[in-house]
């Protein structure tokens, strides 16, 4: 057997662990070899060792830039316990303490130095760094450099000077935020173009992902809770405050212990409900997305969405609050045409600038694709974040359902049936066109199904070639067709025109019969009743 590497020896002798987790070893090697790294790993994934071990193995001190003073202190005391020579420099120290640490740094007595970002602009710090031997720079919470995120810190923009002043010192940037835009921003703002990017650990294997078609969402939710989560702790997310109130009240009437939580409630009541949720078991909190920041309750058995999240990142973050204890948990969502319309409308009427809006549309489309997909949802989710585990097999979406999927999401457990919706789509598209692209879904369905209706006669649409050509499908089936057309952007919604549907350029090949359109066969009944998904 080859001798264990220096890194592995440190892992065992200093930290007391047997083996590396995920991509830790590859990251550590990259730094030891002198390269830069960008590490995207969820919280708890084991990011700290990725820079602590190289700092111990390499000559010189590892400088860790960290924005959170409390975390800095925790990390340093934990390292002291392990016998690692670590210290921090931040505003809580006296001048005397600062001098002492500077002396130890210059004498080469430190393996790790944690420092707050604002100190880097200080000429004293820069002079200090110039006189000591630096093994590496670690930039923790690197997403703080992104102006789109919620945690932007102007001090992080100073971090680009590190590379200018010390071009030969390897750098590692770390974050738990994995969306593409943040990643690109970290790379460009910190000058990490040559960094190797490591994405891993986003899989939550104990969470079962399920997205059902909305029929009567509240009732579906209740059946789901009764069948699989009676007496369990759970979170139900809704988009609006009113829906939060109504749903919590309704669940209570049906015997579920539910509490509301949203930003419109008084501070005291919010605190009270949150506290009760954290302290007691078996409570369901019905909340807007205002709930959840920093919520770390290990035994949340389910997270349910009654409304579509606006991006895959939100979906991942919100569902990720389930099953932190590693035991089986459900991420359940009811989704329908109205969700697509509502979110698109919210985007259309927001006063964000055009560039920002385009990004948001894009994110919503990715979320819709996840809802409408036929292959393994987990693979798609991981692939979205660039997690190797997901992208390795996500390329072959069609084969996923055939058995290489995760085995723990609805599409894997019960492969989705598809049907050739080309003709139905042509009928729907022609109907939109022939009625002048001025009507909403319900009206269009009435025309397609040939309804005897005063308004239709007024407009003369009963004389129209698409009147009654769609009798083969019932109303629900037509809604499913329209939803998928909108989700696939073959049709767009005109919100100035009160939600009327319009054709997009993308629909032409389908309309002309040049493209086959396979559609999901929606399962209308929630599966829970049949015990199809045992817990
Ligand atoms: P992050 O910074 O990504 O949130 P941490 O670095 O705090 O995560 O690590 C989370 C937990 O996992 C810590 O308790 C850490 O000691 C543990 N851990 C990290 N790497 C390993 C490993 N290779 N083997 C066992 N435990 C590990
Ligand atoms: Zn799957």
Image (cartoon, grey):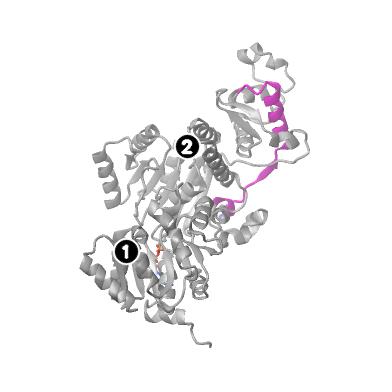
Asked whether 242 falls inside the magenta stretch, the response is no
Q: Position of residue 282 (x, y in %)?
A: 32, 49
Decide: few, some or many residues near mark 2? Use Cα within 10 Å; few <14, some 14-19, many ≥20: some
* Depicted 28 relative to depicted 402: above or below: below
Q: Earlier in the sequence, mark 2 or mark 1?
A: 1
Question: What residue is at 63 percent from the left and 21 percent from the top?
Answer: 438
Q: Is residue 346 above or below residue 78?
A: above
In the image, which residues are magenta?
410-439
Q: For disc 1, does the CB lie below 8 Å from ligand 1?
A: no
The percent position of residue 40, horizontal first and vertical second, equals 48, 60
Say whether residue 248 is left or right of residue 360.
left
Question: Mark 2 or mark 1: which is in front?
Answer: 1
Quarter, ligand 1: bottom left
Direction from residue 497 to residue 63 in the image, left or right? left
| Helix, strand or loop status at disc 1 | helix
In the depicted view, which residue is nearer to us: 527 or 89? Answer: 89
Question: In the rendered image, is residue 193 in sight?
Answer: yes
- From the viewer's side, name the closer residue of 124 and 304: 124
Classify mark 2: helix, strand or loop. Answer: helix
**Splitting the image into 4 quarters, where does residue 9 fall?**
bottom left
89 or 386: nearer the viewer: 89
Neighbor class of circle 1 (other Cα within 10 Å; few <14, some 14-19, many 20+) is many
- Residue that label 2 marks: 217
Going by the image, does 439 lie left or right of 148?
Answer: right
Residue 337 in the image: state x and y as whole percent.
56, 34
Q: Which mark is residue 72?
A: 1
Q: How many marks?
A: 2
Distance (Cα) linking label 2 and label 1: 45 Å
Q: Position of residue 345 (x, y in %)?
A: 52, 31
Residue 46 visible: no
């Amino acid at each position: 057997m080859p001798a264990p590497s220096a890194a592995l020896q440190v892992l065992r002798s200093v930290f007391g662990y047997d083996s590396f987790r995920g991509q830790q070893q590859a990251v550590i090697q990259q730094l030891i070899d002198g390269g830069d790294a960008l590490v995207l790993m969820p919280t708890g994934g084991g990011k700290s060792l990725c820079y602590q071990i190289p700092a111990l193995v390499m000559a010189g001190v590892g400088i860790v830039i960290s924005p959170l003073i409390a975390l800095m202190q925790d990390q340093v005391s934990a390292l002291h316990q392990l016998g690692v020579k670590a210290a921090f420099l931040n505003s809580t120290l006296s001048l005397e303490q600062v001098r002492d640490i500077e002396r130890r740094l210059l004498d080469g007595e430190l393996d790790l130095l944690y420092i707050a970002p604002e100190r880097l602009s200080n000429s004293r710090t820069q002079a200090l760094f110039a006189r000591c031997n630096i093994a590496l720079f670690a930039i923790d919470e690197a997403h703080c450099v992104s102006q789109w995120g919620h945690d932007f810190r102007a001090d992080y923009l100073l971090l680009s000077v590190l590379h200018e002043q010390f071009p030969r010192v390897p750098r590692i940037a770390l974050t738990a935020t994995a969306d593409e835009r943040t990643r690109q921003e970290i790379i460009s703002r910190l000058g990490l173009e040559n960094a190797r990017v490591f994405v891993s650990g986003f899989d939550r294997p104990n969470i079962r992902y399920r997205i059902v078609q909305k029929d009567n969402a509240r009732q579906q939710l209740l059946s789901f809770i009764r069948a699989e989560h009676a007496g369990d702790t759970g979170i139900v997310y809704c988009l609006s405050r009113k829906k939060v109130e109504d749903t919590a009240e309704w669940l209570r009437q049906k015997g579920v212990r539910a509490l509301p939580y949203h930003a419109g409630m008084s501070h005291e009541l919010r605190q009270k409900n949150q506290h009760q949720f954290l302290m007691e078991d078996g409570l369901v909190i019905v909340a807007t997305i205002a709930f959840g920041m920093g919520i770390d309750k290990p035994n949340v058995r389910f997270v349910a969405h009654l409304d579509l999240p606006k991006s895959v990142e939100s979906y991942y973050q919100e569902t990720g609050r389930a099953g932190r204890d590693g035991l089986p948990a459900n991420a359940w969502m009811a989704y329908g045409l109205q969700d697509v319309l509502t979110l698109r409308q919210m985007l259309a009427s927001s006063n964000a600038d055009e560039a920002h809006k385009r990004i948001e549309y894009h994110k919503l489309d990715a979320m819709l694709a996840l809802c409408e997909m036929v292959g393994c949802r987990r693979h798609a989710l991981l692939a979205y974040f660039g997690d190797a585990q997901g992208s390795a097999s996500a390329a072959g979406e069609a084969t996923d359902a055939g058995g290489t999927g995760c085995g723990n999401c609805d599409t894997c457990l019960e492969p989705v049936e598809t049907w050739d919706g080309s003709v139905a789509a042509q009928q729907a598209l022609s109907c939109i066109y022939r009625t002048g692209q001025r009507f909403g879904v319900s009206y269009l369905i009435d025309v397609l199904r040939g309804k005897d209706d005063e308004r239709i006669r007024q407009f003369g649409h009963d004389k129209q070639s698409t009147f009654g050509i769609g009798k083969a499908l019932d109303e629900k089936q037509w809604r499913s067709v329209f939803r998928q057309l909108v989700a696939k952007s073959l049709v767009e919604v005109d919100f100035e025109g009160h939600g009327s549907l319009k054709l997009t350029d993308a629909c032409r090949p389908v309309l002309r019969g040049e493209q086959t359109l396979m559609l999901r066969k929606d399962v209308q009944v929630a599966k829970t009743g049949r015990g199809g998904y045992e817990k």
